[in-house]
Structure formats: structure tokens, C-alpha cells
Image (tube, rainbow, N blue to C red):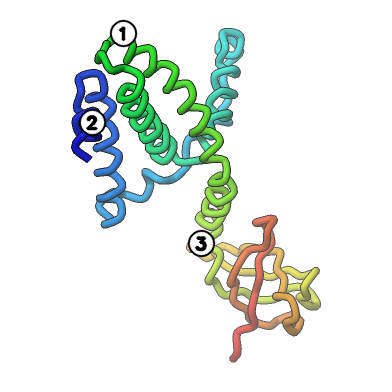
Amino acid sequence: MSELLQESLRFYNFPITVCFVLVVLFWTITVFGIVDSDALEPNLDLDADVDVDTQVHGGSIGLGLLRFFNLGEVPLMILLSVLITLVWAGAVALNYYFNPGQSFLIAGGWLFANGVVSLLLTKFLTVPLKPLMRKLKEGEKHRPVIGRACVIKTSEVTETFGQAEAEDDSGNPLLLHVRVSQGQKSLAKGDRALVVDTLDDAQTYVVRKLES
């Protein structure tokens, strides 16, 4: 442990060690709810239009590069946390084993190579998070509908067919595509139901009959 601390505090490792400590502090205070959860939302819009001049000078290439590293689909703080952790661990290990003379020049070379490898590792390590982030984003988008009461408008609602009408916060009607859960009894026109979930396409809702 003392060797790890000593290597982490060497002049060429110290800046990335500071960044790593900040990452640890960020996630520590996040666990205790001090940081706003918006910091963990993948809310960067990479689909925004760019003008022709920007595209000609590499704007579209830049957006493609950002997408390659999952930016916009995985929260920036998660990407940075993984990247900084990998760079810090690599810098400490490489300089400990392969820079016994504590050369700043050698440390800089290792940092460059380590940074490139860490970027690629960050991309592949965060790929499994993309479906989860999309699911969370869809849930946030449809949260105002889930939990609302509605009235069945079609002749029936089954596992494969049906529409219902709910109201938004302003009292305006919302026509929804709805279904009952597998194995549940179909609902009839005029029945009151509760929206309880969304299906995989995120445009169709699951409803349950409200008992009068």
C-alpha cells in the first residue's frame, strides 16, 4: 500500500492521481444524494443539425467520433470516471515497473500510449450500459403517462389491440395505444383502467382495470 501511495504521488503521476481522487469523491457524494442526478443523464444531443460549413470542415466526423465513444448514450460522468480510473491505474503500474529512473520523458510516453488504450477500453467497457441508459431514458419520457387513469375507447382491449383516452396535466385528452398483460382478461369499451407500464416499443402502454 505504501508503494502504491508513493508511486501515485510522484510528480508525473500526481495530476492524474488528483483527477482519480476527484472521481472517487464525486461517486461518494453521489451515493449520499448530494449531487443532482441530472449529472448522470445521457442528455447530450448529438443529433443536432450542423451547418454545411461545419460538416465540410469535419463537424460530422467529430460527431461520429463522439458517438463511437458512446457519448450521448452513456452519461459523461460515467465515461470520464471509467477513463480516468483506467489512465490512473495504467500510469501508476507502467511507471512503477518500466520507469525505474523516474524519467519525465518516459512517463510522458507511457501516458500517451496508456491514454489511447484507456480510451478504447472505456468505449468497450461502457457498451453494455447503452441499453440500460436507453431504458431509463424511455422510462423518464413516459413517466407522466404511467400511473394515470384512462377510459377504454375501442370495443375492447386485448393483448394485441386497443386504445384508451387519458388526460395530461392541463386536462387535454391523450389517445393511447394500450394492451392488457399476457393472460389477463380483456377490457371493454367504457371501462376505467390504470396505465401501469410500457411495452418494448415505448409507444404502447400496459393497462389494468380499475375496480369501481
Q: Residue at x 59, y 17 (%)?
A: 61
| Mark 1 touches mark 3? (CB < 8 Å) | no
- The C terminus sits in image quarter: bottom right
Q: Quadrant of residue 111?
A: top left
Q: Residue at x 36, y 35 (%)?
A: 85
Please give the residue where the numbered disc 1 appears in the rendered image.
Answer: 105
Q: Report helix, strand or loop for mark 3.
A: loop
Vertical comparison of 153 with 82: above or below: below
Q: Which mark is residue 144?
A: 3
Where does residue 181 sit, x and y in percent of width and height?
A: 70, 75
Q: Report helix, strand or loop for mark 1.
A: helix
Give the alpha-carbon distance from disc 1 to disc 3, as whole Å: 56 Å
| Mark 2 touches mark 3? (CB < 8 Å) | no
Identify the mark nearer the N-term, 1 or 2: 2
Callout 3 amino acid: Pro
Vertical comparison of 62 with 183: above or below: above
Where does residue 126 sit, x and y in percent of width and height?
A: 52, 40
Q: Quadrant of residue 6?
A: top left
Callout 1 amino acid: Leu
- Say left or right for 160 vs 61: right
Callout 2 amino acid: Val
Q: Residue at x 25, y 37 (%)?
A: 22
Q: Which mark is residue 18?
A: 2
Where does residue 190 sit, x and y in percent of width and height?
A: 70, 81
Give the alpha-carbon distance from disc 2 to disc 3, as whole Å: 41 Å
